[in-house]
Amino acid sequence: MVAPSFQAVRRLVVGVVFCVVALTNFRRALRRTTALVLASSRPGPPTSSPYLNVVDENDDGYEVVTTNYGWTTANWARFSQRIVSAEFFDAVRSHRRYNATAWADLEKAPDPSRQIIAFMDIDTCIEGNYPEYALPFTTNSNITVKGEKFFAILRKACGHIKRASESPALTANPNSRLVLLDCGNPPLFNIMDTCGPKENGGDGKDWSVLNNEQVIIAYYGVPKSKARPIDIGLPPPAVKPIVLQPHERHWIETCRKRDYLFSFQGKAGDGRDPLGLLDNGEDVFVKIKDRNTYWGRVHANNTGASLYEDILRESTFGGAPRGDCLWSYQ
């Protein structure tokens, strides 16, 4: 059996992301087609439907699987989950090659003839800006563990990541892969920086997980110079539909003139600073924020998000320069 190429794994990750669109359009209802299962996205233990185990018997390729450490167990409520992670996890379980019981089966009876691409059922994608940008971290959470600090979520995942990387379910076939979603921005919420240090259960810079070619990190905030050759970029999540209020629809239908021809608000750096020269105090609104105080100002008095959105609503064009990751929500 031939190992999936990095391009194949990348296509799988991209396909999983775009599958989120289908889940959203069908309101995440259960829907079965030939060897395709749409699992419920509501937080809770796994659905008992036998359709979750459907795999095309004529398919001799790899199986898409998930670990059984967190969200797929009876203790699912003890594991935090971002909304973006929930949508991605649902998309994984909706893949036509998904096998819900494979990980547990292969841990009990390792089979070198079965090739898997595995995803974690715990949160490693610590992203606070999806689907609502610039809001408090818990707002964009699907499952919140009372009293758990957001920076502790990934730390708790470190041990599970190592456990999965050493599991016979993965190691029995050297062509199998474990894909880790890394939505962190170094040094915050980043798998390499968080799980590597010994105090978090790692082995320092020589963390064994990073030396394991069966483990691929799908990232969007890791500098290319730091990423390993086998790692891949994580594509952006599906674009959310915009719900317009009646008065906003009226503005569009009547071509109401907006206050600004162009606007942009964002952190300094990454080539953005020259944009500040475009602000003319009239119909071009550009505010470049200091990187060190940006989020403090955004959250001040809970007015940052509403002001941000109000400016966008009053703009004919919005700037979307590159940011500090592979892509930008703007």
Image (cartoon, rainbow, N blue to C red):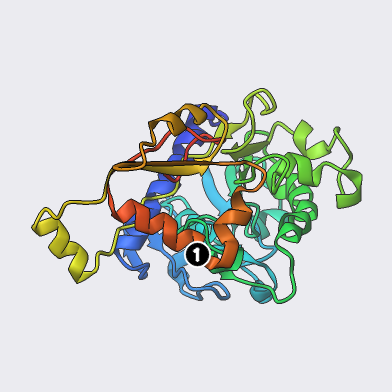
Residue 34 in picture, x, y percent from top left: 32, 56
Residue carrying label 1: 303
The correct choice, above or below, for 205 with respect to 44 in the image is: above
Asked if residue 188 can be seen in this view, the reply is yes
Query: Which residue occupies the foreground of this view, 272 or 57?
Result: 272
Circle count: 1
Residue 304 x, y percent position in the rendering: 50, 59
Q: Amino acid at mark 1?
A: Thr
Q: Quadrant of the N terminus?
A: top right
Q: Tell me which residue sits at (46%, 74%) in the image.
A: 49
| Quadrant where the C terminus is found in the figure | top left
Q: Farthest residue toward the front?
A: 281
The picture quadrant where one finds residue 75 is bottom right
Query: Foreground residue, 28 or 193?
Result: 193
Residue 253 position within the rendered picture, expressed as x and y whole percent measured from the top left: 9, 58
- Mark 1: give few (<14), some (14-19) or many (20+) Cα within 10 Å: few
Q: Residue at x 37, y 38 (%)?
A: 319
301 versus 128 height, above or below: below
Q: Is residue 166 visible?
A: no
- Residue farthest along the left direction in this orientation: 254
Mark 1 element type: loop
**Above or below: residue 63 compared with residue 276:** below
Residue 91 is left or right of residue 316, and the answer is right
Q: Which quadrant would residue 196 be assigned to in this image?
A: top right
Q: As drawn, is 20 to the left or to the right of 222? A: left
